[in-house]
Amino acid sequence: MCATCGCGQPDPVSGHSHHQRHDTLRLLKIEQDLLAKNDRYATSNRNWLNERAILVLNLVSSPGAGKTSLLVQTLKDLKSEIPFAVIEGDQQTSRDTDRIRGCGVPAIQINTGKGCHLDAHQIGHALRDLEPVSGSVVMIENVGNLVCPAAFDLGEDGKVVVLSVTEGDDKPIKYPNMFHEARLMIISKIDLLPHVDFDVAQCIEYARRINQKLEVIQLSVKTGVGLESWYRWLRSVHDLKVGTPAEVS
């Protein structure tokens, strides 16, 4: 019997009972409420960061795409030029945070347990604990996942999606929401291109079907090829944020 209306009769169109339809609607309502609550926290984070002219980039990818290696190399090369802080998201362990702290950069770990993404409330607490200096860059390394993190605004200035050539050039059309939300796509591990079946031009074409404004950088942390292009991009968005901080609403 339907818990909402008590009739239990099947839907004449779908064949589903009223109970099943009410369950679906209830889950949809819960999801909408969750995202609305997250968006309120994200707005609070964004205002707090804008007041301090702090740039925040949300690094997202599948597991093993090379986010941490890229982040470690970036910190080593630019930490004397730009003040950094890092928020690390993982389901378990603090291994990546230990690597970041080994670079001499403040970092905080968020373990999500069974959770598949970071949310804005967690980031708000982490920012207050880190207390990044005005004009700095906060790098958020999200949980390895191309699905859930796409839906959760953290208050960042942009998502940077890292796609390894070992994953397949069709990832943008298989996970369109993430590439639609991203500001920059980094194609990583390009030193492996001779050894894998990955069409760079096709990958970029797929990505720009989803997001015409998406910027693209190809690089290899192992060989250093393309890193300077990434650093130029990072400097430019940092200078823009520091030079013209957004007005707090």
Image (spheres, rainbow, N blue to C red):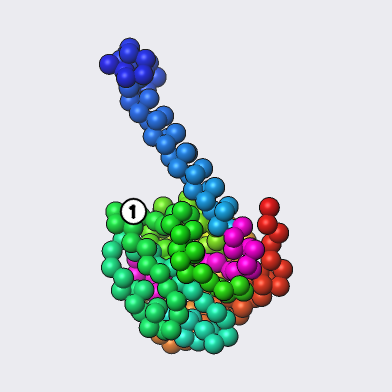
- Name the spot of residue 26 as percent of width and height, x first: 40, 30
- Image point (69%, 66%), residue name: 245
Q: Is residue 51 visible?
A: yes
Q: Is residue 33 above or below residue 102?
A: above
- Image point (53%, 48%), residue name: 39
Count of labels shown? 1
Front-most of 148 and 106? 106
- Asked whether residue 49 is drawn in magenta, I would say yes
- The magenta-colored residue range is 47-69
- Name the spot of residue 7 as percent of width and height, x first: 33, 12
- Asked whether residue 60 is drawn in magenta, I would say yes
Q: Is residue 209 visible?
A: no
Q: Give the SS element for disc 1.
A: loop
- Name the spot of residue 206 as percent of width and height, x first: 51, 60
- Image point (54%, 47%), residue name: 40
Disc 1 marks which residue?
A: 115
With 232 as the anchor, is 202 left or right in this view?
Answer: left
The quadrant holding residue 45 is bottom right
The quadrant holding residue 105 is bottom left
Front-most of 188 and 84? 84
Q: Amino acid at mark 1?
A: Gly
Assign the N terminus to one quadrant of the image.
top left
With 239 as the anchor, is 226 left or right in this view?
Answer: left
- Image point (67%, 72%), residue name: 242
